[in-house]
Image (spheres, grey):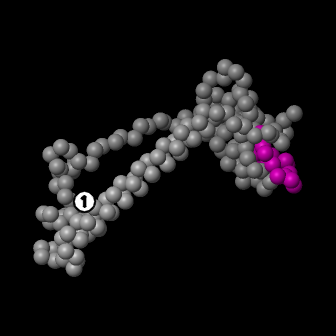
Amino acid sequence: MMMVAALLFGCKKPEETIPEITPTTTTSGTTDSGDEAGAHDGHDHADGHDHADGHDHAEGEEHGESAEQEAESGAGEASENAAESEEAAEGNEQKEDSASTAATSDVRFVSHTRIEVPGMMCPYSCYPTVRETLTSVPGVEEVQLAKQPEGTPEGEIRERVVELKVKPGFDPSQAIAALAKAHYEAKIAQ
């Protein structure tokens, strides 16, 4: 029954999309929407009143600081912000390097239990449903798709088995029942 449904409806492979990046300002000093470059975050700055402390002053209004004090504090804040930006950029590069290393390595856990799920046909809709269903079962720590045979095309599952990392007290019959409730036949694999 599940195989007939899978063949009739098929598996939905997610569409890959590339986000579009648009510049916020152009060389003419206006944004793409035509606003002046001094207008941002929903407010306009009067001529010469764009302050490093993040707020505007009306004509003739002052903090109580002299122009020299304000310039000195603005320069100090600017150098602190630049140093923080550099540190953040270095941290992001390190995170990206470790993420790309983790993505390319095939890290697998040692399986305690293997469950055969004949109706699990594709890695895009079937497997995520099976994984979510099994991770909700008490005693299941992690779920992974069994290693596929060499030469298996992308988007296809030939070894229709999931491997579970379980805690003490795990009941396989609960996992089988949860999969049945999600309309997947299943049995403990040998």
- Residue 53 appears in the rendering: yes
Using the image as rendered, state which of residue 53 and residue 40 is in the foreground: 53
Using the image as rendered, state which of residue 88 and residue 24 is in the foreground: 88
Q: Residue most toward the bottom?
A: 64
- The residue positioned 65% from the left and 39% from the top of the image is 126
Amino acid marked by disc 1: His
Q: Position of residue 97 (x, y in %)?
A: 54, 39
Residue assigned mark 1: 40
Number of marks: 1
Q: Which image quadrant: the C terminus?
A: top right
Using the image as rendered, state which of residue 143 and residue 40 is in the foreground: 40
- The residue positioned 73% from the left and 44% from the top of the image is 143
- The residue positioned 60% from the left and 29% from the top of the image is 155
- Residue 115 appears in the rendering: no
In the rendered structure, which segment of residues is drawn in magenta?
Answer: 163-179
Q: Position of residue 113 (x, y in %)?
A: 83, 41
Relative height, residue 165 to residue 148 (above, below): below
- The residue positioned 59% from the left and 36% from the top of the image is 101
